[in-house]
Image: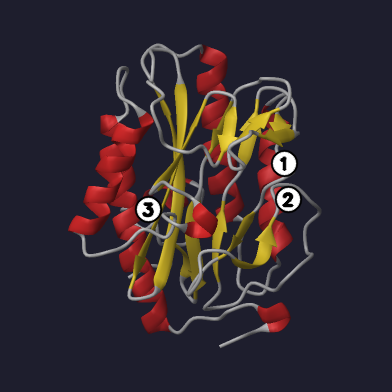
Amino acid sequence: MMFERGIEIKTPAQIKTMRAAGLVVAETLEVLRESAVAGVTTRELDAIAHEHIRSRGASSNFLGYHGFTGVICTSVNDEVVHGIPGSRVLRDGDIISIDCGAVVDGWHGDAATTVAIGDVPDEVLALMRVTEESMWRGIAAARLGGRVSDISHAIETTIVGAGDYGIVEGFTGHGIGSQMHQPPDVHNYGKPRRGAKLVKGLALAVEPMVTLGTSSTRILDDDWTAVTTDGSWAAHYEHTFTLTDNGAWVLTALDGGKTRLAELGVPYGGD
């Protein structure tokens, strides 16, 4: 069913299927966190992801998307998003952002995490913590009857309050459901109480991208990989979530987000 501005509203049964897809994504990212070590290539990580997604009876929503050649996006150091898996070897001190998606019975899940490889500088670890925290604060700000920009404002407030970081402007979170990318856009900055209304059946992918420097990016010659224009390193975290009468339900978290939401004083809305 379509809502305002062409926004797709899912039935409870459809949301449950999205949860099934989200669990495949969550499990795949757990496997990849363990596999992302010094000496591994990003192509090897892609193969691991492909095998795990297939083993769970799901399919990749990244592979072939507008010609994308990977099952996951692998973005290393100053690469912000959409890095293509290939021959690059991970080295001690790197960070890698891994974006992963899966489809179950036509319904999508999408999430991302950033992994530290070996001995990473404290300022980079802090960047990762701030980025992940801003994502959770954004989700925690969502309430039925609220607005999408409530999420955006919470993300921005968290990042700005943590230090002098760059909030990437060229990419946003998004609606998700029967397609991977749908309206509405979920910006990582903005004033509250604006944009689409938050209602039951709306599913959103919230994904802050934060840097140690600039907020601007450029696209490499592969027409996919976005890097910071000043070479500063970037972190990227993402979860797909929805709102029920009981609270927030993070469809791509293994526990549905229950633990982190409780820490933030937010009701858990999952089964």
Which residue does the numbered mark 1 point to in the structure image?
Answer: 157
**Where residue 237 sits: x, y (%)?**
51, 42
Question: What's the distance in space between the residues labelled 1 and 3, CA to CA?
Answer: 23 Å
Q: For the image shown, how many numbered marks are present on the structure?
A: 3
Residue 197 appears in the rendering: yes
Which residue does the numbered mark 2 point to in the structure image?
Answer: 153
Quarter holding residue 5: bottom right
Residue 266 appears in the rendering: no
Query: What residue lies at 21% left-to-right and 60% top-to-bottom?
Result: 56
Query: What residue lies at 40% left-to-right and 80% top-to-bottom?
Result: 14
**Where residue 126 sits: x, y (%)?**
55, 22
**Where residue 73 sits: x, y (%)?**
46, 42
Q: Nearer the viewer, mark 1 or mark 3?
A: 3
Q: Locate residue 113 relative to residue 123 in the image: left or right.
A: left
Residue type (three-letter) at the residue carrying disc 1: Thr
Task: Point out the tag, 3 or 2, that comes first from the N-terminus.
Answer: 2
Quarter containing the C terminus: bottom left
Which residue does the numbered mark 3 point to in the structure image?
Answer: 253
Residue toward you, 231 or 193: 231
Q: Are marks 1 and 3 in contact (CB under 8 Å)?
A: no
